[in-house]
Image (cartoon, helix red, strand yellow):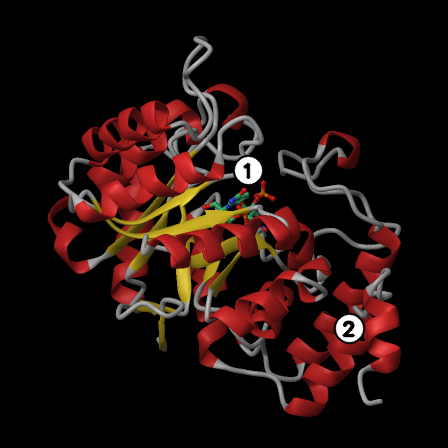
Amino acid sequence: MKYNQLGKSGIRVSELCFGTMTFGGRGMWSNVGTVERQNAAQMVSTCLAAGINFFDSADIYSDGFAEEILRYALGTHRQDVIIATKVRGRMGRGPNDTGLSRKYIIEAVEASLTRLGTDWIDLYQIHNWDADTPLEETMSALDHLVQSGKVRYIGCSNLTGWQLAKAQMLAELRGWSGFVTLQALYSIIHRDLEQELMPLCKEDGIGVLPWSPLAGGFLTGKYRRGKPRPLHSRRTDPDKAFLKFNEERGYDIVEKLDELSSAHNGTVSQGALNWLRVKPNVSSIIIGAKTLDQLEENIKCVDWQFTEEEISALDEVSTIKLRYPYFMQAQWKND
Ligand SMILES: NC(=O)c1ccc[n+]([C@@H]2O[C@H](COP(=O)([O-])OP(=O)(O)OC[C@H]3O[C@@H](n4cnc5c(N)ncnc54)[C@H](OP(=O)(O)O)[C@@H]3O)[C@@H](O)[C@H]2O)c1
């Protein structure tokens, strides 16, 4: 397992991070996964044995239950790992049980610390933007958490370019902690990040943590053009799937991944992860799994890698059109 610097921070994380969104199966998460304590403990042991030292959760996953299961699954290994979790989603019915107000952030961190059974969170991430709370209030509350030792680093997720740039600039001008990571949708199918956010992250040394690197299971080879879809999977019914995309383009990518991965005795899933592993600025890829077999298959991606020519072929089949104003800037770049 390779270890990367977590953005500009001083800590090193394994190039694979294990996401806990499949833990618990409560509420709206039951369709995603129902991994219970014993299975979670097995999965976490498998990760640790493979050298994974980084685990991602969120308060909202299974309404808090995923954090509790992670605590159980880690057992005595708390000190050995980097735990990331998130705040922003709705955790109660009240008007203040969501968002990024100072009140809510301070309450939410205490609740996560209790569920995780720890005195500190290594990486505390805002899960989304809150348009109703002044950015100053959010950033100063997050800095307060870092100063108080409850949180070691802060990160963000699902922000636009201007939001992230504004937050970083504000933190810098005020001497507050800035975000060390951006957790974002990024896979060989979803490459929007490359147009605005990736250049910003490169410029500012923000580490990228791709989520849904297998596009919710599509990039595993079990969805094939013209073939029956697998049952009991997240994308069994594409109309109900959370991630919407052009599956015809997706099949072209899967076929290319299959062809090139087979030449290395690898699988489609491993190929999709290996495409991400060579992308600049990626600190760690947040892998997901519903079963131990899936997890084991995915972790084995680190055992091989594509050649440069193969990566170029994958870039080509998955290329996306530049949107405005990016195509205008691309045209004038060398003038
Ligand atoms: N910040 C955010 O907004 C955000 C959003 C989403 C996720 N995340 C984070 O990212 C992590 C990973 O996301 P994700 O679960 O969507 O990742 P993903 O890798 O795109 O999808 C994982 C799912 O794909 C299927 N799968 C995985 N490996 C497989 C294999 N080898 N063979 C067959 N099927 C396989 C399983 O679902 P089925 O068996 O049901 O097909 C599994 O649950 C989450 O746990 C969470 O920590 C963050």
Whether residue 10 sits left or right of residue 257 in the image: it is left
x, y (%) of residue 241? 70, 35
Residue on which disc 1 sits? 129
Amino acid type, mark 1: Trp
Residue placed most toward the observer, 308 or 165: 165
Ligand 1 neighbours mark 1 (CB distance < 8 Å): no
Amino acid type, mark 2: Lys
Q: Residue at x 55, y 56 (%)?
A: 165
| Secondary structure type for disc 2 | helix
Residue on which disc 2 sits? 256
Between label 2 and label 1, give the one nearer the viewer: 1
Residue furthest front in the image: 173
Where 53 falls versus 92 (above or below)?
Answer: below
Residue furthest top in the image: 94
Q: Residue at x 85, y 50 (%)?
A: 246
- In the rendered structure, which disc, 2 or 1, sits on the residue that comes first in sequence? 1
x, y (%) of residue 180? 39, 60
Whether residue 233 sits left or right of residue 246 in the image: it is left
Q: Which mark is residue 219?
A: none
| Secondary structure type for disc 1 | loop
User: Which corner quadrant holds the C terminus?
Assistant: bottom right
Q: How many circles with numbers are drawn on the protein?
A: 2
Whether residue 8 sits left or right of residue 149 in the image: it is right
Ligand 1 neighbours mark 2 (CB distance < 8 Å): no
Q: Quadrant of residue 104?
A: top left
Q: Quadrant of residue 252?
A: bottom right
Q: Residue at x 41, y 51 (%)?
A: 155
x, y (%) of residue 6? 36, 67
